[in-house]
Amino acid sequence: MSSDIILETRGLVKEFKGFVAVNGVNLKVQRGTIHALIGPNGAGKTTCFNLLTKFLEPTRGTILLEGSDITHEKPAQVARRGMVRSFQISSTFPHMSVLENVRVALQPTLGTAFNFWQSSRTLDQLNGRCMELLDHVGLASFAHLQASELPYGRKRALEIATTLAMDPKLLLLDEPTQGMGHEDVELVTQLIQKVAADRTVLMVEHNMSVVGQIADTITVLQFGEVIAEGAYAEVSRNPKVLEAYMGSTDEALEGIGE
Ligand SMILES: Nc1ncnc2c1ncn2[C@@H]1O[C@H](COP(=O)(O)OP(=O)(O)OP(=O)(O)O)[C@@H](O)[C@H]1O
Ligand SMILES: [Mg+2]
């Protein structure tokens, strides 16, 4: 049923001065799933992600969000439709507290025109919702800490909390576990799974063990083209995928073909 597809691309192409970085990608993201985009270095993952989040204009092709053509819409327009990129509005303010960061993200939901000088009483009304969100991402006990003092994995959790303030239907994450140690990877993986309980998540991810643990569907890119798609068990055994990763010096290889 096509209504189960929240996001679709048709023949998506991105050329950089004649170099084809994304080459005819047809993607279908099923509502309610965690969908991962993987592939070796230079495969076109980030370019594809930037096309979807409207940070880049495609050379050719169409992007449909819930059946509406959003190919030429601006990032703010697609955000209003419920598709939100994690860092889009969540560049956290390091010198504000964790709670204040979420409160700033929630301010637009007040309905009144955004006013930085809003009375502290109005802002206090948001605190309840803030604490709910912080609790949801496991940050309730960190609420009064300065954001800059959070450990790395918790910073990502805060970014996710500020993104959730927009109540997105479709959350787009670009390498959410990048540069993290094992413990933080675990924390963020579980968090993604939790927030995916009532929304769709599309993520670019290098870490195969994360993808293997939580992705329902995996699309594998190589040289800008989709070479395989399916559940981890199938994709990780696909000869084309194994070959694509062959000779890769990437730590992403760990776990594939196990
Ligand atoms: N702005 C640009 N101008 C020219 N070439 C680009 C540009 N952005 C990306 N490319 C090229 O397009 C190809 C795909 O790049 P992209 O960053 O999308 O790959 P990736 O799959 O995200 O790789 P990585 O795993 O290293 O992050 C690469 O060959 C890259 O050099
Ligand atoms: Mg990339």
Image (tube, rainbow, N blue to C red):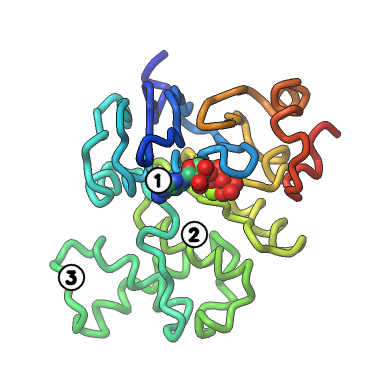
Circle on res. 31: none
Residue 44: % across, % down: 51, 39
- What residue is rendered at 74% in x and 42% in y? 248
Nearer the N terminus, badge 3 or badge 2?
3
Q: Name the residue tied to disc 2.
A: 160
For the residue pair 38 and 172, the one nearer the viewer reads as 38
Q: Classify mark 1: residues with Cα within 10 Å, few (<14), some (14-19) or many (20+).
A: some
Residue 252: % across, % down: 72, 46
Q: Name the residue tied to disc 1.
A: 50
- What residue is rendered at 60% in x and 23% in y? 227
Q: Quadrant of the C terminus?
A: top right
- What residue is rendered at 43% in x and 60% in y? 87
Taking the image as shown, residue 187 lies to the left or right of residue 168, namely right
Q: Are marks 3 and 2 in contact (CB under 8 Å)?
A: no
In the image, the residue with mark 3 has its CB under 8 Å from the nearest atom of ligand 1: no
- What residue is rendered at 39% in x and 41% in y? 169
Which amino acid, by three-letter code, is at mark 2? Ile
Q: Name the residue tied to disc 3.
A: 114
As helix, strand or loop, the secondary structure at mark 3 comes to loop
In the image, the residue with mark 1 has its CB under 8 Å from the nearest atom of ligand 1: yes
